[in-house]
Amino acid sequence: MVFGNSLFYPILGFASFVVFIYMSFGGIRFSFLEEGPELSFVERNGTQFVLDEKAFYVNGWNSYWLMVQSVDVYSRSKVREMMKTGAKMGLTVCRTWAFNDGDYNALQTSPGRFDEQAFQALDYVIAEARQHGIRLLLSLVNNLQAYGGKSQYVKWAWQEGVGLSSSNDSFFFDPSIRTYFKNYIKTVLTRKNTITGIEYRNDPTIFGWELINEPRCMSDPSGDTLQGWIDEMSTFVKMIDKNHLLTVGLEGFYGPNDPKSSTVNPELWASRLGSDFIRNSKISNIDFASVHIYPDHWFHEQVFEDQLKFVSKWMLSHIEDGDKVLKKPVLFSEFGLSETNQNFSMSDREKMHRAVLDIIYKSAKRNRSGAGALVWQFLVGGMKEFSDEYGMVPWESSSTPHIFIEQSCRLANAKGWTQLDVGFKEHC
């Protein structure tokens, strides 16, 4: 050799090291591009979601924490483990946060400024979901303060001397804050994934976008302010992305002028929050309605049996709305039972889960608008700091995965197999 043996072997060793590093890290993008499954966009046909021209009913879950757990490489294994667990249970959609505003490991550090490492974390979540055939419902901002939320936008505007009000509800009416949020939407939707090379707006891994988690504008109980905001932001999203479905992120409360505000809402306060399920969901750019189910938080004196009755009444009312009034799918995007309830038992939680899933299955059998449900929330082991009173690690309870596998099997048998990982079939 020209270099002689004394130089050849160290150079060969270094070259091997470089190849190893590339294949381990730099080659990630290549492996995702080559091995990622072919996916189609989920669409809407009337009151149903449609995938590959077949009705698609959702059995899924919430894991809000996926992006923040992907910022540091050492914790990304938890995201992969969660995706594998979901796929093994036959779950098809995961709802998660695509926001972290001004918080620790923030995606948006200040208006229009983004942390690239945090953005690459979201890239990873999407790429990992794609690998496991899981679709993502991505929420764009929080009504609550966790991970920044609307209050962080108000704080930014106030700090920059352009805010109209210190009220958190100015998020919905302040022109400067609306501009902040539109810039955020555009940046996220047009982001090119550094792993897959696909812009978010062109990636069928994304099931759809959620404008805001649980919007409330209590300073205007008429609902006009929130209605105007939803109209403007939904139009803006659709100008940029015509591929994906869009929802608001509502809890499902009926507005003050709706007769159901007194017959179906949990209590009088629910009609005074500035949101209006029918009115907000009717907006033309909103593709499907969203509803949450938390009777244990909404009623403080009800016994569990009465809560179960409310769950049925609540769901059937909104499915009726989807069929007859909205003529759109209705996704129950959060449901759960708190372990802090007096006399809580895992048996009661499982009864509540079964009640929700049974109603969705019956809706699917009858081709109705009850288009799916996402339980709140699943985690993997060693994540106590991300858990809450609803958190579950599926395989720590033998019955929890069984309930959701059974639902996956029922929906698949009724509407066709859409899962990439069909290992759960052996349990059907």
Image (tube, grey):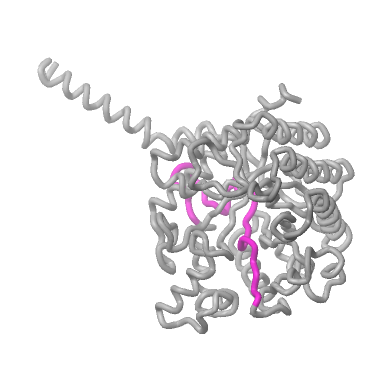
In which quadrant of the rendered image does the C terminus lie? Answer: top right
Marks counted in the figure total 0
In reply to whether residue 207 is colored magenta, the answer given is yes
Percent position of residue 376, x then y: 64, 48
The one nearer the camera, 386 or 71, is 386
Residue 232 placement, left or right of 257: left
Magenta stretch bounds? 191-218
Tell me the quadrant of the picture where the N terminus can be found. Answer: top left
- The percent position of residue 223, horizontal first and vertical second, equals 71, 76
Query: Observer-nearest residue: 150 or 267?
Result: 267
Residue 336 on image: x %, y %: 69, 48
Direction from residue 184 to residue 118 in the image, left or right: left
Q: Which residue is painted at 73% across and 79% down in the image?
A: 222
Residue 226 picture quarter: bottom right
Residue 415 visible in the snapshot: yes
**Vertically, is 164 above or below 259?**
below
